[in-house]
Image (tube, grey):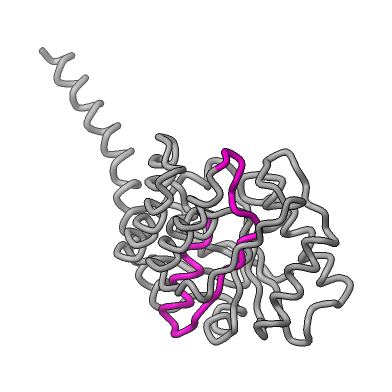
């Protein structure tokens, strides 16, 4: 009997050692989430709120899967960001369906159809193994920036979050425009930070670490806004395979965007 009591006591101690830090972390996360949702952090965060911003994506659903925190935070601050999607997402011959899903998703994210543009060019195919031509893509992007007086572009970094070749092609085109000084004067570029696999699926638990690490803009969604982002993602019904439901639950990108200036 004594041995049994010692066993239960040891188990309770071990549970306490696990549960107490988890509860503390959850409490810290909740406070930080409220704080940074109310006041985004970073030298470029306030600037982004009043900018004529363009979110540059590769496929319909990127705007919800990866950039919902940026889009909703900018909208919350009174901005009216636009989306330029550089393919129709026609890898499985669903391009027309996916264009409609994109408009529905953007509508839930506060972006009217008039601010959503899809580039559907045969030389910019939706294909994870194809790197898009930098010059061709840069020409499309630059024309859109100039035609719409864009002064802030938000897109993927060199890792493309998921390593998708089309995502990385967007970064390559923007880096080319930036380094060659082809962007209009005053137009800045923010790129979405790619994180390791562990952090990628920490969901809200990555908030404390994201707050500690340096970034030029940090956008964090409230619980209500996170559900709004998930509803936007559910508009992409043609893409909702089982693993994307898990993605919506666990991905930090449904809650947090940390960005860096190019």
Given the current orientation, which residue lies at the most extreme left position?
1
Please, is residue 18 above or below residue 175 in the view?
A: above
The residue positioned 46% from the left and 58% from the top of the image is 100
Residue, x 59% and y 68% (percent of image)?
117
Q: Is residue 47 left or right of residue 165?
A: left
Q: Is residue 137 left or right of residue 258?
A: right
Q: Position of residue 112 (x, y in %)?
A: 45, 74
Is residue 132 located in the magenta-colored stretch of the structure? no
Residue 126: give x, y in percent of width and height. 65, 46
Residue 240 at what x, y percent from top left? 42, 42
Magenta-drawn stretch contains 87: yes
Looking at this view, is 156 or 262 the one in front? 156
Look at the image and tell me whether residue 56 can be seen. yes
Q: Residue at x 56, y 78 (%)?
A: 45
Can residue 32 be seen in this snapshot?
no
Q: How many marks?
A: 0
Q: Position of residue 65 (x, y in %)?
A: 49, 53
Residue depicted at 66% across the width and 57% down the height: 120
> Relative to residue 28, is residue 135 drawn left or right?
right
Quadrant including the C terminus: bottom right
| Closest to the observer, 228 or 9 | 228
Q: Nearer the viewer, residue 228 or 257?
A: 228
Q: Identify the magenta region.
A: 66-93
Report which quarter residue 33 is drawn in.
bottom left
Q: Quadrant of the N terminus?
A: top left
Q: Establish if 136 lies above or below 50.
A: above
């Amino acid at each position: 009997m004594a041995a049994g009591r010692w066993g239960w006591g040891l188990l309770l101690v071990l549970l306490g050692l696990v549960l107490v830090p988890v509860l503390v972390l959850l409490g810290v996360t909740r406070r930080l989430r409220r704080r940074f949702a109310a006041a985004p952090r970073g030298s470029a965060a306030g600037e982004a709120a009043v900018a004529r911003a363009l979110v540059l994506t590769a496929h319909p659903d990127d705007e919800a899967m990866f950039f919902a925190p940026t889009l909703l935070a900018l909208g919350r601050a009174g901005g009216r960001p636009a989306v330029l999607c550089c393919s129709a997402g026609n890898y499985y011959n669903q391009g027309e369906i996916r264009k409609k899903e994109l408009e529905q998703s953007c509508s839930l994210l506060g972006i009217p159809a008039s601010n959503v543009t899809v580039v559907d060019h045969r030389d910019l195919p939706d294909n994870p193994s194809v790197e898009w031509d930098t010059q061709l893509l840069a020409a499309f992007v630059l024309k859109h920036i100039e035609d719409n007086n864009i002064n802030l572009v938000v897109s993927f970094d060199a890792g493309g979050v998921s390593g998708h070749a089309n995502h990385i092609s967007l970064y390559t085109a923007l880096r080319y425009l930036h380094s060659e000084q082809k962007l209009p004067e005053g137009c800045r570029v923010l790129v979405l930070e790619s994180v390791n696999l562990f952090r990628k699926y920490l969901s809200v638990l990555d908030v404390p670490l994201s707050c500690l690490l340096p970034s030029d803009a940090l956008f964090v969604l409230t619980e209500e806004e996170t559900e709004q982002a998930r509803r936007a993602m559910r508009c992409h019904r043609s893409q909702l395979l089982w693993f994307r439901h898990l993605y919506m639950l666990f991905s930090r990108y449904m809650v947090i965007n940390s960005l860096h200036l190019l």
